[in-house]
């Protein structure tokens, strides 16, 4: 089930998050090891990049940066948890994403499990978005798209802005015994 939740944070707060992202170190080229030989691809002929990601929280990799970005992530997570039909247990990973017009992303899954959902929170409006199982969801400021983490998806870059910023969170679900 794909769910959309609107009006999570006001545009002014999202702009403050983007400003903070622009001044944060440790961005890395985004890629999926399962689908890509990054070194050969980056050293090959000119082409598109894969965007950039900033990982600030990850349970399995024991990452929890002392950063206002994690506070923003927790606030976004809490508001979505309050408004979703899914039974959130806890966040598993926070990724902040940056794509420019030449970014090219690949279809991937975030987690191959039925006990996790992902949400993609859009920090500003643009004509880019997210493709999930072949359907396109436009990037609208303050809006989150929630979907099972094992759904195939990819980012779609913007053509009407120079860049696209978003927040991706993987969430572990409560396991309800029946």
Image: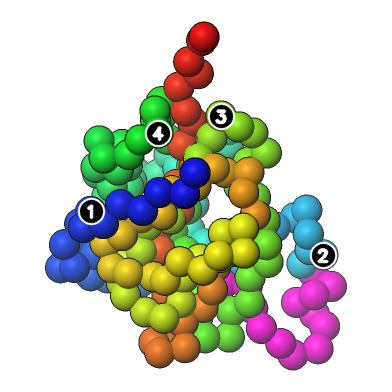
What's the CA distance linking mark 3 and mark 4? Answer: 11 Å
Few, some or many C-alpha atoms within 10 Å of disc 1 (few <14, some 14-19, many ≥20)?
A: many
What's the CA distance linking mark 1 and mark 2? Answer: 37 Å
Whichever of callouts 2 and 4 sits on the residue coming sooner in the sequence is 2
Few, some or many C-alpha atoms within 10 Å of disc 4 (few <14, some 14-19, many ≥20)?
A: some
Work out whether 145 lies above or below 24: above
Determine which residue is flagged by label 2.
Answer: 37
| Quarter residue 11 falls in | bottom left
Element under disc 3: loop
Residue at the image position 32 percent from the left and 39 percent from the top: 84
What's the CA distance linking mark 4 and mark 1? Answer: 16 Å
Q: Are marks 4 and 1 in contact (CB under 8 Å)?
A: no
Residue 123: x and y in percent read 32, 66
Q: Which residues are magenta?
A: 39-51
Determine which residue is flagged by label 3.
Answer: 115
Few, some or many C-alpha atoms within 10 Å of disc 3 (few <14, some 14-19, many ≥20)?
A: some
Q: As drawn, which residue projects farthest toward the top?
A: 178
What's the CA distance linking mark 3 and mark 1? Answer: 24 Å
Determine which residue is flagged by label 4.
Answer: 86
Work out whether 116 lies above or below 107: above
Residue 92: x and y in percent read 48, 36
Work out whether 98 lies above or below 26: below
Compared across the picture, whether 20 is left or right of 178 comes to left
Q: Is residue 12 visible?
A: yes
Residue 144: x and y in percent read 35, 55
Determine which residue is flagged by label 1.
Answer: 8
């Amino acid at each position: 089930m794909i769910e959309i939740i609107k009006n999570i944070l006001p545009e002014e707060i999202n702009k403050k998050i983007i400003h903070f992202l622009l001044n944060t170190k440790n961005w890395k080229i985004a890629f999926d090891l399962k689908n890509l030989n990054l070194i050969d691809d980056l050293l090959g002929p000119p082409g598109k990049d894969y965007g950039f990601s900033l990982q600030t929280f990850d349970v399995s990799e024991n990452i929890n940066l002392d950063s206002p970005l994690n506070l923003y992530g927790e606030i976004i997570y809490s508001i979505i948890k309050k408004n979703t039909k899914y039974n959130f247990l806890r966040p598993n990973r926070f990724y902040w994403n940056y794509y420019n017009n030449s970014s090219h992303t690949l279809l991937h899954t975030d987690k191959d499990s039925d006990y996790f959902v992902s949400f993609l929170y859009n920090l500003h409006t643009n004509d880019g978005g997210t493709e999930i199982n072949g359907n396109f969801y436009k990037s609208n400021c303050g809006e989150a798209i929630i979907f099972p983490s094992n759904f195939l998806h990819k980012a779609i870059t913007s053509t009407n802005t120079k860049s696209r910023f978003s927040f991706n969170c993987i969430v572990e679900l409560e396991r309800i015994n029946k």
